[in-house]
Amino acid sequence: MASTIRLELVTPERLLLSEEVDEVVLPGYEGEFGVLPGHTQFLAILNIGVMWYRMGSAIKKIALGGGFSEVTHERVVVMADSAERADEIDVGRAQRARDRAETRLKELSMDDDTYAKVHAALQRALVRMAAGGGG
């Protein structure tokens, strides 16, 4: 069995990552799941959340905006709606987005048509802050 697994992360705009890694943890729709080399094959829906991967003792974080993943014995392919590496995230901007979304949510009822959209914006801001080290 291989000691690493190939991780590929693509968004509609770019190939963000293609590396051999030791471990991957993804924000699945039903909760977080981890992938190691030789993992059982499956497809998963991804939620808005922080994805992280380990290479040796180094752990790197990426903010995901949802998407899908395909896991095979040798490879994890993540097809994300959006993704940002921790070093690309402007934490101050994410905090301002969080504040705007929280203020807006206080003005809306859950029956409002825009509630889900604003709630998703809040989730994205919180994930960006967590991945970027600001939350």
Image (tube, rainbow, N blue to C red):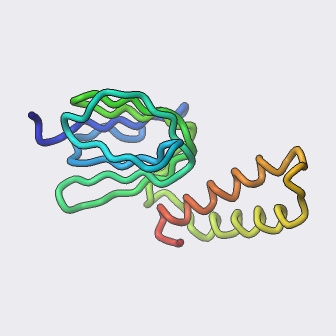
Vertically, is 92 above or below 27?
below
Quadrant placement of the N terminus: top left
Which residue is outermost to the left?
1
User: Is 107 positioned to the left or the right of 45 in the image?
Assistant: right
Whole-percent x, y for residue 103 in the image: 82, 68
Q: Provide residue 10's location: percent of width, then percent of height.
A: 45, 34
Find residue 94 and report its image quarter.
bottom right
**Residue 27's spot in the image, x, y percent?**
47, 48
Camera-side residue of 6 and 69: 69
Q: Is residue 29 above or below residue 128?
A: above
Q: How many marks?
A: 0
Locate residue 66 relative to residue 55 in the image: left or right.
right
Q: In percent of the image, x 84 and y 62: which residue is there?
A: 104
The single residue placed furthest to the front in the displayed view is 30
Residue located at (49% from left, 50% from top): 84
Residue plotted at (69% across, 65% down): 98
Judge left or right: residue 73 versus residue 68: left
Name the residue: 73% across, 54% down. 119
Picture coordinates of residue 7, whole percent (x, y): 30, 38
